[in-house]
Image (cartoon, rainbow, N blue to C red):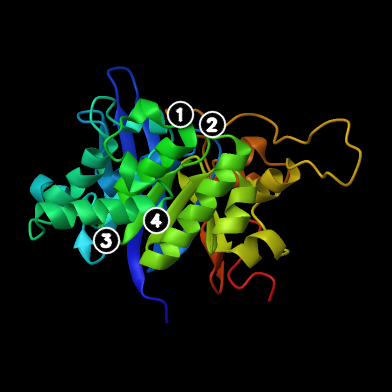
Amino acid sequence: MAEKLLEIKDLNVIYETDEDTVYAVNGLDLEVNKGETLGLVGETGAGKTTTALSIMRLLPEKVGYIKKGDIILDGIDIVNASEDEMRSIRGNIVSMIFQDPMTSLNPVIPIGDQIAEALEFHRKDLNGKEISDKVDDILNLVGIPPSRKHEYPHQFSGGMKQRIVIAIALICEPKLLLADEPTTALDVTIQAQVLEMMRELKEKLNTAMILITHDMGVVAENCDRVAIMYAGEIVEMGTIEDIFEGKFHHPYTDGLFGSIPDLTKPTRRLKTIKGLMPDPTDLPSGCYFHPRCEKAMDICRKERPKICRNNGHMIKCHLFSDNFGV
Ligand code: SF4
């Protein structure tokens, strides 16, 4: 049986400003097994990045708060860990790759020194030569000649900068990698190369990954399981086969697939999901998707749907009951 690495239960995260409270994550449940890749998919504002920042405990200070719930990573209670404990966990057990490599790197420090920094902090047992050798190894792994480690970020292309960011994230061989739209800022050919490299690295180091994206193509090629997120909660989760080939889906997942153009047929207009994501300061009653759902019923406006499961496939919708499709 697959061994659990990350377990999130009933996670609720808010952002508090002087005027409003933003309900960013609302009762999120998620599990990731060792070595597995989970795709976290949803529109902008669905709460994907907030979920990742909560796992890293890097929510903006005095604004973002975990109000409720548990995050257990490799047996560690992340929500209640001290700041000192978190410093030894970040970069070591869990690392994060941010969307824009331009802003993730320090422009005035050579890239080799930036990669070495995490090792110097977490691996006090290594001497200077061993650290330098490890930096060379990871640069080779991400396809950058180690001879360039004394160069600065501006001397590299966008794709190479993202490879450097990935090298920094993986240098301590974390058990979990949070990749937040890691290739969105790159053009399509470089995107394919970087994703291929991430896949190889992941296999070599047996790192589990949460791949945050809104690109179903990226999910299909890189993930073992998929979680579809809407208004701060997971509305459907299953294996790649459940999501891409299964008959039963949450209406939001159907909408996402419906909006992908079919290149084999002439299409005059692209299909969209009507309406917008709800205002996170004022979420709708009942099912958060009901104002946009073509299948909404009376109960959907009044009652929160419960989670329905069929083996590993889960859907949160009033249209389903447990063991749906059986
Ligand atoms: Fe649509 Fe109702 Fe299901 Fe929500 S619970 S997705 S409104 S059918």
Q: Secondary structure at mark 2?
A: loop
From this viewpoint, which residue is outermost toward the front?
Answer: 147
Give the x, y percent position of residue 24: 40, 37
Residue highlighted by disc 1 = 282
Q: Is mark 3 within 8 Å of ligand 1?
A: no
Residue highlighted by disc 4 = 141
The amino acid marked with disc number 1 is Asp
Q: Nearer the viewer, mark 3 or mark 1?
A: 3
From this viewpoint, which residue is outermost toward the top?
Answer: 19
Residue highlighted by disc 3 = 72
Sequence order check: which comes first, mark 4 or mark 3?
3
Q: Are dots 2 and 3 in contact, CB under 8 Å? A: no
Q: Nearer the viewer, mark 1 or mark 4?
A: 4
Q: Nearer the viewer, mark 2 or mark 3?
A: 3
Q: Residues within 10 Å of mark 1 (few under 14, many from 20)?
A: few
Q: Quadrant of the C terminus?
A: bottom right
